[in-house]
Image: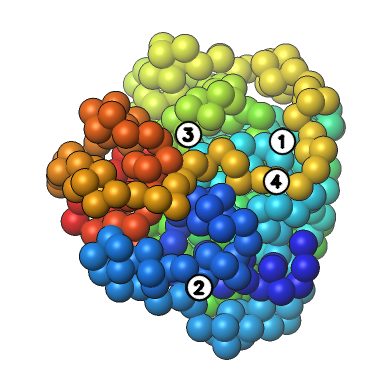
Amino acid sequence: MSEQERFDRLRLIRSPRIGPVSFRQLMARFGNAGEALRAVPELAARGGGKASVADPTAVETEIGRSKALGARYLLIGDLDYPFLLDQMEGAPPALIVRGDVGLANGQCVAMVGARNASAAAIRFARQLAQELGQRGAVVVSGLARGIDTAAHQGSVATGTIGVIASGLDISFPPENAALQEQVAQEGLLVTEHPPGVQPLARHFPARNRIIAGLAVGTVIVEAAPKSGSLITARLAGEAGREVMAVPGSPLDPRAQGCNQLIRDGAILIQNAADVIEAVGSIDPRMVRQGNVDFAGAPVSSDVAATERDTVIGLLGHAPVPVDEIIRLSGLSPAVVQTVLLELELAERLDRLAGGRVSSR
């Protein structure tokens, strides 16, 4: 990949209303980011709106700030972009990282859990992470309070990856600043956000998909119902990864999420041997053999006005799966995806989790 193409790809993903799905679709249609950038305004016009692309000066400034932090970029298409993450729906087109990138292509196991975890759970998580590291696994977590902190502390000596919901220059929670720096120095620190971005609430579910996507399996250690940890577990399950949980007392609300996961089919975990047995070894076929192509995101260069009207007519404020729109419209996936892309660029469409869309 040329330096110009790398710059254009970063500029494309930093452009307004372009997310992971639309990025892949634009790359599938135009083949390179430069052509995609030039086409964005016209596509938005077809969708009934206007769109601009990221200012190259702003992107140059971001790159300079990242380099000053000792960070580098991993783009989809790079040979060292984490392969398992690349298979995740909505994988970030650009990651900013500090540390040992090779860890992300090892046997990664995610560990997440309650921020207000019990002392017993924190001790268990730290010990479990340490034993997993001794068995050759890389522990992935989110540098949050509680279980995340314990997981990193237990595994930083053997290999750990911290995924954060802010820029690399922001530490959250603030008391984990030293730990975050240690992870960057001795392990790998990962984000999809440029320097200076604060950890907003909406960033954490997106952060969780990276945690789940990097790992062959996810272990939950204490989690209340409807917690962020259960979101990570759901994302892991949807991606075909192993979901594991540590059981707890039914009298402790912090254990209800784990017990519920086990009841619903998650693997019960009591020690590191259970985890290693559950995840097995990495299939040698799950190693990238070449550059990523974007053929899996069908788009069309020819959409008739009647076809566009058909797709728009099936959209409403209630989210609906894209597959359902394809079925009801009778149109090809490429045509439907193109119309949705045009509407998204025109700010007339929202994409939601689970491959669903709704009109604005």
Q: Earlier in the sequence, mark 4 or mark 3?
A: 3
Residue 353, given in percent of the width and then of the height, sits at 37, 41
Q: Earlier in the sequence, mark 2 or mark 3?
A: 2
Alpha carbon separation for disc pair 1 and 2: 39 Å
- Determine whether the residue tagged by mark 1 lies in a helix, strand or loop: strand
Q: Amino acid at mark 3?
A: Leu
Alpha carbon separation for disc pair 2 and 3: 34 Å
Q: Nearer the viewer, mark 4 or mark 2?
A: 2
- Determine whether the residue tagged by mark 2 lies in a helix, strand or loop: helix
- Quadrant position of the N terminus in the picture: bottom right
Q: Earlier in the sequence, mark 1 or mark 2?
A: 2
Alpha carbon separation for disc pair 4 and 3: 22 Å
Mark 3 highlights which residue? 235
Residue drawn at x 57%, y 83% as measured from the top left: 56
Residue drawn at x 43%, y 68% as measured from the top left: 40
Mark 4 highlights which residue? 292
Q: Earlier in the sequence, mark 4 or mark 2?
A: 2
